[in-house]
Image (cartoon, coloured by chain):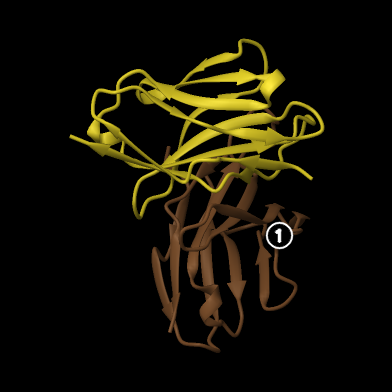
Amino acid sequence: NAGVMQNPRHLVRRRGQEARLRCSPMKGHSHVYWYRQLPEEGLKFMVYLQKENIIDESGMPKERFSAEFPKEGPSILRIQQVVRGDSAAYFCASSTEYAYNEQFFGPGTRLTVL
Amino acid sequence: AQSVTQPDIHITVSEGASLELRCNYSYGATPYLFWYVQSPGQGLQLLLKYFSGDTLVQGIKGFEAEFKRSQSSFNLRKPSVHWSDAAEYFCAGRPNDGTASKLTFGTGTRLQVTL
């Protein structure tokens, strides 16, 4: 059973470009979470999705950031018009819908904005 | 507001020595609590979790943690540290409300192991 998969592992963008980060949850998992880790900091929650639904986006910046988890295919975190401050590691986690199950993390995508 | 605090940013221990990493939480009710480990450039691996019941929780790689309600703490321990334990350790919590929900992380403790 493959774990949580994220691609690309490393992404370099110039200021003003768009960044698309993909996350495929573990088999059987219907919940996806995105977290951001800024250099020398802990992980901060961004958004929590189920298939075709955003459940909690309280950690998402109000502009330029969006996320989706379509019926088919991976979850996508999209950052438009990237700025240097967006440089960070973005981690995806997945879980089942059961409260007693933990979140499993992917290896992360390290975004560098030049 | 819900929060998780790790007071120690950086800890250095000698190989073979014992280890304790501190974690305090602030939630309205006892949360679910977790310890994760992150090696450089890697994702997070779950070491152990506390949901309810026995307050001493055993995890992987010889780690254990003790939940203390009176101190709002969930400290991670290991009797004898190995050089391969050098990594960043994160304590995390989420509400005990019967639903799947987001994790709140502490800022992490970086463990250095000297030979």
Residue A26 % position (x, y): 51, 43
Find chain A in the image and tell me its colour.
brown
Residue A54 % position (x, y): 75, 57
Q: Quadrant of the C terminus of chain B?
A: top left
Q: Which of A56 and B90 is in front in this view?
A: B90
Q: Which residue is drawn at 23% across and 34% down?
A: B83
Q: Would residue B38 appear left or right of B6 to someone viewing this image?
A: left
Quarter of the view holding residue A67:
bottom right
Colour-to-chain, yellow = B
Q: In this view, does B106 lie above or below A22?
A: above
Q: Would residue B11 appear left or right of A77 to someone viewing this image?
A: left
Query: Which chain does the numbered disc 1 sit on?
Result: A
Residue A3 % position (x, y): 44, 43
Quickly name the residue at label 1.
Answer: A59
The residue type indicated by label 1 comes to Gly
Quarter of the view holding residue B59:
top left
